[in-house]
Image (spheres, rainbow, N blue to C red):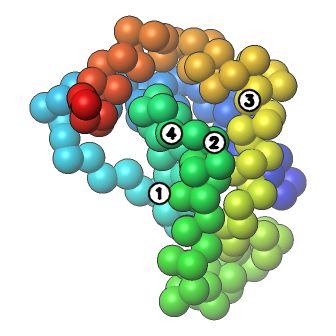
Amino acid sequence: MGVNQMYKEFAVYCQAEIREALMVFTDPNNYPIEIHCTQGKDRTGMVSAFILSIAGVPEDIIVSDYAKTQKGLVPVYREMLEDVRRAGLSDDFAEAPPQYMRDLLRFLKERYGSIDGYLDTIGFGKEFRERVRKTVCVDE
């Protein structure tokens, strides 16, 4: 299984965990919030993409934001590559090209109709999204 498939598996089989991570963002008392995971690109990238989407950020910018991860991996790439190989994983597990996020967003749209449709499915409905929006967005 490659990273693209893993992202889809996360979206389908880790819905409770994704909802739990997103719930942290509904309480203004939790801010500032640091998001991280082992490599800072997979689960972190997904949660970040959902928060950006909730904030109204266009998908092309969400993908562009995720793509910055690849540049951030450069200083630790060799070490990450050794780690993923030692774990018996393919080299793509040490990378974060924009196509991974693009494919995830397309999958969510195809399967759930939209990112909001996915968030509704996992129990992170409009009320929760509005709470996040009020905290992370500046009123104009």
**In the image, what residue type sits under mark 3?**
Leu
> Are discs 4 and 2 less than 8 Å apart at CB?
yes
Which residue type carries mark 2?
A: Glu
Q: What residue does disc 1 label?
A: 37
Q: Is residue 119 above or below residue 70?
A: above
**First reached walking from the N terminus: tag 4 or tag 1:** 1
- On screen, residue 53 above or below 119: below
Q: Nearer the viewer, residue 14 or 60?
A: 60
**Residue that badge 3 annotates:** 108
Instruction: Answer with the quarter of the image where residue 105 lies.
Output: top right
For image coordinates 48% across by 46% down, the residue present is 48
Q: Label 1 sits on what residue type?
A: Cys
Judged from the image, the secondary structure of the residue bearing numbered disc 1 is loop
Please give the residue where the numbered disc 4 appears in the rendered image. 57
Mark 2 residue element? helix
The dot on residue 59 is 2
Q: Which of the pair 88/34 is nearer the observer?
A: 34
Q: Secondary structure at mark 4?
A: loop
Q: CA distance from mark 3 to mark 1?
A: 22 Å
- For the C terminus, the quadrant is top left
Q: Is residue 69 left or right of residue 3?
A: left
Q: CA distance from mark 2 to mark 3?
A: 12 Å
Cα distance in 3D space between marks 1 and 2: 22 Å
Instruction: Decide: is 54 above or below 78.
Output: above
- Which numbered disc flags the more N-terminal residue, 1 or 2? 1
Which kind of residue does numbered mark 4 sit on?
Val
Q: Quadrant of residue 114?
A: top right
Tell me residue 106's x, y (percent).
Answer: 79, 37
Instruction: Give the structural element (helix, strand or loop) at label 3.
Output: helix
Of tags 4 and 1, which is closer to the observer?
A: 4
Q: Are marks 4 and 1 in contact (CB under 8 Å)?
A: no
